[in-house]
Image (cartoon, rainbow, N blue to C red):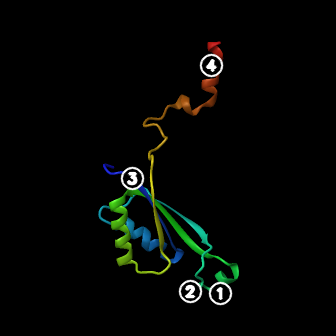
Amino acid sequence: MDQPACKLMLVFPENIGDRVVELLQASDPPITGFTTWAADGHGHDFDSSEMRERVRGRVRRQLLAAVMTLPRAKDLLEEIRQRIPVRHVTYWIEPVLGFGTLAPRTIDTQALDPTTQLCSEESAR
């Protein structure tokens, strides 16, 4: 990423989850490497909620987190706004101070065995 990274968070009704994921994958360029999960929303607007949600005091939601550049996040929000015009889609954008993976490029089998390091440390004594 040439530009600073940001994290786009989306919260939306679970019944549009597949549409949101499909839109991200079909977007140009496609958004890859995002995470989705189920959640309960504890909001203030229960007007369009089902009776069971009103009784429970919360509504089923899905969350999506994706790291991208700020211009890409803004473009994606506009694309979602146009192609999935649904109420109750909330978003926020946060700066990302660091982003990467902790996995090594190649797998070190000795690093996977915790006794290897202990044995070599003890033999060095």
Circle nearer the N terminus (1, 3): 3
Q: Quadrant of residue 117?
A: top right
Residue bearing the label numbered 3: 5
Determine which residue is flagged by label 4.
Answer: 121
- Inspect the image, locate mark 3, and give the three-letter code of the amino acid beneath it: Ala
Report the quarter where the C terminus lies.
Answer: top right
Q: Is residue 117 above or below residue 88?
A: above
The disc, 4 or 2, on the residue closer to the chain's N-terminal end is 2
Residue sitting at x 38%, y 73%: 80
Which amino acid type is shown beneath numbered disc 2?
A: Ser
Q: CA distance from mark 1 to mark 4?
A: 63 Å
Q: Please name which of the two marks, 1 or 2, marks the residue nearer to the observer.
A: 2
Q: Are marks 2 and 3 in contact (CB under 8 Å)?
A: no
Q: Position of residue 100 (x, y in %)?
A: 44, 45
Per the image, label 4 sits on a secondary structure element best described as: helix
Q: Give the Cα distance between marks 1 and 2.
A: 9 Å
Q: What's the mark number on residue 51? A: 1
Q: Residue furthest right?
A: 55
Task: Check disc 3: other Cα within 10 Å, few if <14, some if 14-19, many if 20+.
Answer: many
Q: Earlier in the sequence, mark 4 or mark 3?
A: 3
Q: Amino acid at mark 1?
A: Met
Tell me if mark 2 has few (under 14), some (14-19) or many (20+) residues whose alpha carbon lies within 10 angstroms of its own.
few
* Residue type highlighted by circle 4: Glu
Observer-side mark, 1 or 3, equals 3
Q: Left of 64 or right of it: where is 39?
A: right
In contact (CB < 8 Å): disc 1 and disc 3: no
Location of residue 121 in the rendering, given as x and y in whole percent from the top left corner: 62, 19
- Secondary structure beneath dot 1 equals helix
Residue 48 tag number: 2
